[in-house]
Amino acid sequence: MSSSTTASQTELKNSKIPLAWRDGCSSLLLPLNVCRKDKFYLPWECENERHAYEKCQYDDYVRRMKKLSKLKLEQAEAEES
């Protein structure tokens, strides 16, 4: 399952990304971490990279919640029948 926002397992392993952070937005996390290290983790730096990563995470959350509500609706309709 490779998409435009998913980095390869080799890239993630080489970058030492923890398993918990290896999700659909992992390819945006790699440049964000590089920028953070280069800029000494200053909070006002790397805003564009951070915003792109957080937007991806939010969009993923919304997609999963829509899928969950659809599943619950289908289960409720099945129980009524």
Image: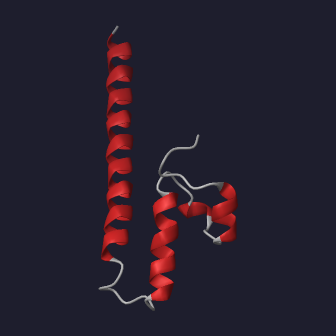
53 left or right, relative to 10: left
Which quadrant would residue 48 be assigned to in this image? bottom left
16 left or right, relative to 26: right
Considering depth in this image, is 58 or 15 the residue closer to the camera? 15
Query: What residue is rendered at 48% in x and 87% in y?
Result: 38
Considering depth in this image, is 19 or 11 the residue closer to the camera? 11
Is residue 77 depicted above or below 53 in this figure? above
34 left or right, relative to 18: left
Quadrant of the image for the C terminus? top left
Coordinates of residue 25 in the picture (x, y in percent)? 46, 56
Quadrant of the image for the N terminus? top right
Coordinates of residue 13 in the picture (x, y in percent)? 69, 65
Considering depth in this image, is 3 or 62 the residue closer to the camera? 3
Q: In this figure, which colouring scheme has been used for the structure? A: secondary structure
Q: Which residue lies furthest to the top in this view?
A: 81
Query: What residue is rendered at 33% in x and 86% in y?
Result: 43
Total marks placed: 0
Coordinates of residue 24 in the picture (x, y in percent)? 49, 51
Is residue 36 depicted above or below 53 in this figure? below
Coordinates of residue 60 in the picture (x, y in percent)? 38, 48
Which quadrant would residue 12 be assigned to in this image? bottom right
